[in-house]
Image (tube, helix red, strand yellow):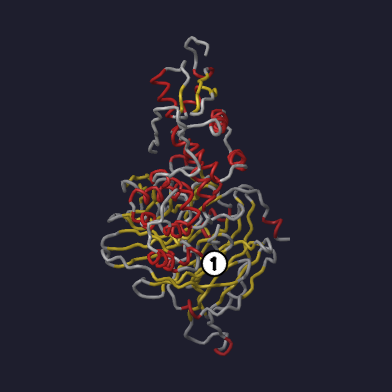
Amino acid sequence: MKKFVKVVETNEEVKVNNNSYIPDDFSFSILSKLPLKSLKRFGCVSKSWSLLFENPHFMNMLRNHFLSNNHRSNYGVTLLLLYDNDLPVHYTLYLLSDDRFENRVKLDLPPPIQEVVSTLYILSSTSINGILCLGNLRSRGMVSIFRAVLWNPATAEYMFIPPSPDEDVPPYRDPVCLFDGFGYDHVRDDYKLIRYIIFFDLTDDDEDVPWEDRSYDPLLEIYSLRNNSWRILDIDMRDIAHCAYDQPQDGAAVYMDGVCHWWANNDLFNLTGILVSYDFSNEVLFTTPMLLDMVESCDFIVNRRLVVLNESIALISNYSKPTTFHISILGELGVKESWIKLFIVGPVPSIKCPIGFGKKGICFKQNNDELVWIDINTQIIDEIGVRAEGYSFPMGIYKESLLSIGGINN
Amino acid sequence: MAQEASSSTSSKTISLKTGDGEIFEIEASAAKQMKTVQRLIDDLGDDITIPLHNVFSKELPKIIEYYKKDITGEITKDFEAEFVKDLNDDEVKVLFLAANYLDANKLFEFLSQNIADRLESKSVEYVRKYFGVENDFTPEEESKLREERAWSFRGIKEDE
């Protein structure tokens, strides 16, 4: 912080008054705390302000603010779900109140979940009013069966969600979930799950169900805790049915302010994409096509993933050759010109994928499954000493509350 | 100022004199949080009234109030909200500049955030005036930029 010192030689009043000019150095302290939309608008203040995003000193302050603000205490603590094939209980769930993994606290999963050896994940990677939704995929013959449980870790109360009557039914088709999410409808004070299922034909011989009675139509369904039931949503999914999605168990869904978002890749090269969003209160699914800049120096895009960072939607683009990660923030939902590149990590050949954000850096999983922190200022890689096998579960957010699940579902 | 035998810092008070000649007392532990003050104490000694040419009697008591709360460890979100509640944008700016002059980091960061929150939905012209920045665009350049960034003007009243 630079000092602003005016040497007073006489008794003359030197007032730091209302019209005083604020030098750049400490105006950056204010500007780096503004939302991206405001920063873009204030680019019209003067020429130097229009070049803020090209000013390395300012961008450093902006990046640091984004990370440190992301961890204000009212957001909750970090959740980390780890899988280890060698342990009798394969899954361990930890709370991390700071970036120091040595201080992690283990959370006991609900007893029926502790025995789970198949795929387990946290829907939307976040608690909502203290409630987490855990998803589990078990194999039954050739088919993957989904079940979910709502859980409040603070009270240890849990409740299995009844299976969807439309998803799990016939033997002739294999349901595959393209995306799912856990969210909150603040109009009805209701907790909901959304799932988008496509079906594959399983049988090629005669089955009990004749052809004319079979349906392979994709299914968009909602579960309501208040009603304790599923219902099918009548929404035209044509625009996004053909897109490629990250698997739900990789933490593809993000939830923010009553809306779940997913990234749909609609071209082979991952250059364009569609942001798919579901608003639980207005019961509307909307899509925003996105065109992003190709980065010349990098060969091709391996993957794109959404995360929530500092109350904004962020997109992590994983480039290969060289392995770099570009993180862009969406300045305004629905505005495709409002993506702003904020972080570039790399080249880092040993890194596989991002896991989460800390106060000063980003947590990644290496190719050998070891977790590391990369400091955003120095790009120094710091090994944590923790392994994360299996799927690349992103870090989640948990904020404790004593809300009763049974109290909502009467 | 009575001469005190060297005692524990917690009970010692420091005298500060503002640019307009008023004197205020703060505890030595609070003075430590204001690096400029602490540097002056280190140079001039803690028995002398420390002169602060660029801070005035209007804002210094408010700053002292903040650090008094800070040394008891009681600064909460509620306290901070209350602290700035009745201040207008210009009054906060004066405090902000004073906090910078005093090198009082915690207050400086808090006020930075508060000013950012206040400016978030303001117009370009308001921000120019607030920061004392001159518009060096030609009218054509400015309207071109506004068009490029049109999305960032949505929902903003440009005359505020």
Q: Nearer the viewer, residue A383 or A379?
A: A379
Q: Is residue B133 left or right of residue A397?
A: left
Q: Position of residue A214 (x, y in %)?
A: 56, 85
Q: Where is residue A203 in the image (x, y as percent from the top left)?
A: 48, 82
The residue beneath circle 1 is: A146
Vertically, is A129 above or below B35?
Answer: below
Report whether residue A117 is seen. Answer: no
Vertically, is A314 above or below A29?
Answer: below
Dot 1: what SS? strand
Q: Position of residue A147 (x, y in %)?
A: 57, 64
Query: Hey, which residue is sitting farthest right in the picture?
Result: A410
- Looking at the rendered image, the quarter that the C terminus of chain A falls into is bottom right
Report whether residue B105 is seen. Answer: yes
User: The disc labelled 1 sits on which kind of residue?
Assistant: Phe
Q: Nearer the viewer, residue B8 or B111?
A: B111
Vertically, is B107 above or below A74?
Answer: above
Q: Nearer the viewer, residue B27 or A187?
A: B27
Q: Which residue is drawn at 26% across and 60% down?
A: A322
- What chain does badge 1 belong to? A
- Looking at the rendered image, the quarter that the N terminus of chain A falls into is top left
Q: To which quarter of the image does residue B65 belong?
A: top right
Q: Position of residue A354 (x, y in %)?
A: 39, 56
Q: In this view, does B13 lie to the left or right of B38?
A: right
